[in-house]
Amino acid sequence: MRDIQQVLERWGCWANNFTGVDWSPVAAGFSCLPRVVVHSQRGMSCSDADGLIIDMCVARLRVIACADELDCIERYYMYGWSKRSIARHLGCHEREVRRMMQVAESFIAGCLEMLDIELDMDHEVNTEKSCAARKNCVNM
């Protein structure tokens, strides 16, 4: 089973600013300016294939009329807002933001499970340990 929060952290990094290109986003004629390469300061990104799959699942939140949950997920994972900042922005209690995030994370995890697709990052974000690693493993 994959840790959906780790999956969404990587997706957020990918969705926010990781393009994998090193040209400057300025108009022609300004090429004499130094090139700026934007790298994420928040951690690892996911592959483009994984990013597109996760992005599709996240976008389903808008289709099922969960725009507030989508807003919370985007602000937290893509833009790095704290849950308290999101609550202040939405004018609600932090507990409500945590509930909305839990609903959204569970929905996205369910979408990924329903698709039954192996992500490139699965070997890094799985939380389930093998039987040999468990302390209480009983042979039958």
Image (spheres, rainbow, N blue to C red):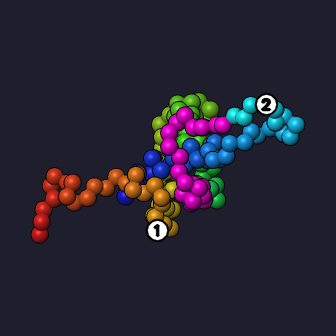
Which sits in the foreground, 28 or 127?
28
The residue at the point 88 percent across, 37 percent down is 29
Q: Label 1 crowding class (10 Å Cα cut-off): few <14, some 14-19, many 20+?
A: few
Q: Which residue position holds label 2?
A: 33
What is the distance, in whole Å, between disc 1 and disc 2 at their CAs? 46 Å
Q: Give the range drawn in magenta.
A: 37-56
> How many numbered badges does the structure rendering display?
2
Q: Which residue position holds label 1?
A: 116
Instruction: Give the position of the N terminus as an image quadrant.
Output: bottom left
Residue at the right extreme of this rendering: 29
- Label 2: which secondary element: loop
Q: Please tell me whether mark 1 or mark 2 is closer to you in this view.
A: 2
Q: Earlier in the sequence, mark 1 or mark 2?
A: 2
On screen, 56 above or below 83? below
The residue at the point 66 percent across, 37 percent down is 37
Q: What residue type is labelled 2?
A: Leu
Find residue 81 and report its horizontal and vertical position in percent.
Answer: 57, 34
On screen, 70 above or below 25? below
The residue at the point 53 percent across, 51 percent down is 46
Q: Is residue 52 located in the magenta-colored stretch of the structure?
A: yes
Instruction: Give the position of the C terminus as an image quadrant.
Output: bottom left
The residue at the point 50 percent across, 39 percent down is 43
Q: What residue type is labelled 1?
A: Asp
Residue at the front extreme of this rendering: 32
Which sits in the foreground, 34 or 69?
34
Find residue 21 and report its horizontal and vertical position in percent.
Answer: 67, 46
On screen, 131 above or below 97? below
Q: Is residue 46 located in the magenta-colored stretch of the structure?
A: yes
Q: Label 2 crowding class (10 Å Cα cut-off): few <14, some 14-19, many 20+?
A: few
| Residue 65 in the figure: left or right of residue 1 | right
- Label 1: which secondary element: loop
Find residue 128 and report its horizontal and vertical position in percent.
Answer: 31, 55
